[in-house]
Image (spheres, helix red, strand yellow):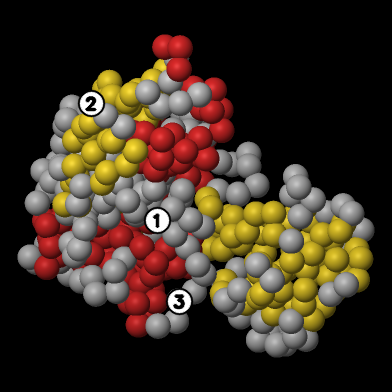
Amino acid sequence: MSTTPRDMANTYVSLIPVWLRYAALLVIIHSSAEAKIITTTKTETPLRSVRVLIGSNVKLFKVRSTDSLTFENTAGDILHQAAPHQWMSIRARQGVIEIDDVVYDAQEVIVQSSQIAPIELSKYKNRKWQDVISYPGSMRCSLSDTGHINIVNHVDVESYVAGVVAREVWPTFAKQAYRAQAIIARSFVLRQMQRRQSKSWDVTDGQGSQVYAGLREDRTGRRAIQATKYTEGIVCIYDDGKQSQIIRTYYSAACGGMTQSAAIFGAEDDIAPLAGGVACDYCRIAPGNTYRWEPVRLTKHEIFRRIVARYDSLRSLGTLRDLSIVQRSAQGRPVTIRLRGKDDQHHDMLVEQFRLAIGGNQLRSSDFRMRVSGETVIFDNGRGFGHGLGLCQWGMEGQAREGKSAAEILRYYFPGSRLQRAY
Ligand SMILES: [Zn+2]
């Protein structure tokens, strides 16, 4: 479900500084098949907070809480206060922020509830107020490059993980699948936090990172909280003999038969647990067009139209004369596709980027056979849903249904990894 190649293709960033800081806090754990996943003495650590971009270039939004809300500038001065249940609108106009139509000389405002109640938020979009979402933690609202507002939710990691689990699992998934999902959601975000310290946010709230929409208060939300509490602080670790690192625990809906290598997306991910080649037939239980997908037929003209809609610079190809797979992974999945345009021009791109430009719900994975017939391109033998790296979510569920524990499932999809408490 998560992590697009845009995110994955990001450059290699050293993870040592923060890692060293909490390497000392790590306590070796035992991953047992059932009972407790981990037994450990808990180490006192400060509550770690993740910064999630929940709105970019937002023109107008409103917030409220069951507690009173305060609006502070970055110096800590209280600019504005709102009574419990009172909606307050926020927008940017001419380089400053307005709260409830009052102009403040501030380019950044921090919204917090006076107690611990979540902050409810609704954005005004397409001429109407969108669904209200409840977020734990606080909000940092800053002027964006376009003169509107970026909203960043500062939330403790465990609450964030529960929010991700609630959106990334299928509600019917088994308990051990929820727990495995909590561990990979936590590992993934802690890894992102290590590499984005200099930026103003660690992750987005969509599939480029992990899907997150604050608190979810139904049964799935409650099960997600239970799984998060049960696995509190536990992450997937890899030791290469020199140092330990938290694994960037990629995952996707269904691998279609074999997991893929992450190495093509950068040296940082060229580690044994992400090498791919894990055979998985467990995801055949996935419903609908997931384990295998139906052939897709598109004209070259339509493919070119969709590609340039996403990558404007490729307009210079002029047209799409032909396309071919020029590189495959060790597992045989297409990795690089060559687009040929006019005058012998060509452009090579990752097939993951290509398929997302075409439409990730139509070309459901990059694992396909491609045939060109005149002006028509046929994609068939489609296997799996998503990028196929790391953990296979339907495979995780398949294994959980067969009685495997979360720890066993994670060792299966990330060979050579182990579980450890990060805090
Ligand atoms: Zn699978």
Q: Amino acid at mark 2?
A: Arg
Q: Is residue 230 left or right of residue 30?
A: right
Do labels 1 and 3 touch, CB within 8 Å? no
Residue receiving disc 1: 186
Task: Look at 82% across and 78% down and name the residue there.
Answer: 81
Q: Amino acid at mark 3?
A: Arg
Question: Does residue 129 lie above or below 259 as drawn?
Answer: below
Rendered image: mark on residue 198: none
Task: Look at 9% across and 51% down and name the residue there.
Answer: 281
Q: How many angstroms separate mark 3 from mark 2 (CA)?
A: 40 Å
Task: Look at 61% across and 74% down and name the residue there.
Answer: 130
The quadrant of the rendering that contains the C terminus is: bottom left
Q: Position of residue 49 (x, y in %)?
A: 56, 58
Viewer-proximal residue among 341 and 24: 341
Viewer-proximal residue among 142 and 34: 142
Residue receiving disc 3: 216
Q: Position of residue 82 (x, y in %)?
A: 79, 81
Front disc: 1 or 3: 3
Residue receiving disc 2: 328
Q: How many angstroms separate mark 1 from mark 3 (CA)?
A: 17 Å
Q: Position of residue 132 (x, y in %)?
A: 59, 77
